[in-house]
Amino acid sequence: MALRSDELGAAVAAYVGRCGSSGSSSSGASPKQCYADAGYWEERFQETDGMFDWYTSYKEMSGIFAEFCPASSKPKVLMVGCGNSAMSADMHAAGYHSITNIDISSAVVEKMASQFAELGLEWRVMDATAMELDSESFDLAVDKGTVDAMMHSTSAACPEALATCAEVWRTLRPGGLFILVSHSRGRQAVVESAVLQRFGPDAVWEYLELRRC
């Protein structure tokens, strides 16, 4: 994982440049403020077609999936903040056939559900900070960029990010895996504080690997 504090800003700049529009929302908020604004992403996805993978792709991460949660184990997968990423479609092609994709933007969920209707994946409009999903129902959760978008600082005092990580814990089965791709210095503090605050001192993540890429 890279450690540059504004890596998300670089990714947003690349995304905005690809879409041919400015990085500010209609409200006039700064780019960093926009990242955590659901309205910003709804507007962006309404204006944009096509696919875009934040940070990394399934091809680049396939070795990690194969090592820690291979498709042969038939895991139930939760894709947090799916956006218009090709990740779920690529995972399906690799043998991961039970994938629930959630995103706060109804525009992107509608587009993705239509584009990949033949795959039989689940696409749901949902707030990641308060998931309408059963507890202990997934074997694998994946996030690349959603928690970062919610973080306003490098500290653990980010309520949206904390709530999202706590919800991931709640929806994972015991022994479940959370693959978090983040470029924020505060990422580890957030995932640890999230479960401590919600579930108490007995809730502790076991880190399989902290990888820089």
Image (spheres, rainbow, N blue to C red):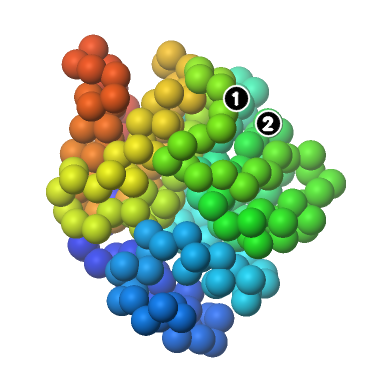
Residue at image location 48% in from the left, 25% down from the top = 171
Q: Which mark is residue 181?
A: none
Amino acid found under the numbered disc labelled 2: Ser
Q: Quadrant of residue 210?
A: top left
Q: SS class of the residue under badge 2?
A: strand
Residue at image location 37% in from the left, 81% down from the top = 28
Would you say residue 3 is visible in this rendering? no
Compared across the picture, whether 109 is left or right of 41 comes to right
Query: Measured from the top left, where is residue 71 in percent x and y?
Result: 62, 29
- In the rendered image, the residue lying farthest to the front is 27
The residue at which mark 2 appears reads as 98
Query: Measured from the top left, where is residue 196 in percent x and y?
Result: 22, 24
Compared across the picture, whether 47 is left or right of 118 comes to left
Would you say residue 87 is visible in this rendering? yes
Query: Measured from the top left, where is residue 113 in percent x and y?
Result: 74, 51
Q: Relative to residue 5, is residue 43 depicted above or below?
A: below
* Crowdedness near tag 1: few (<14), some (14–19) or many (≥20) residues, C-alpha within 10 Å: many
70 and 17: which one is in front? 17
Q: Quadrant of residue 20?
A: bottom right
Is label 1 in contact with label 2 (beta carbons under 8 Å)? yes
Q: SS class of the residue under badge 1?
A: loop
User: Between marks 1 and 2, how big is the CA–CA gap?
Assistant: 7 Å
Q: Quadrant of residue 78?
A: top right
Q: Which mark is residue 75?
A: 1
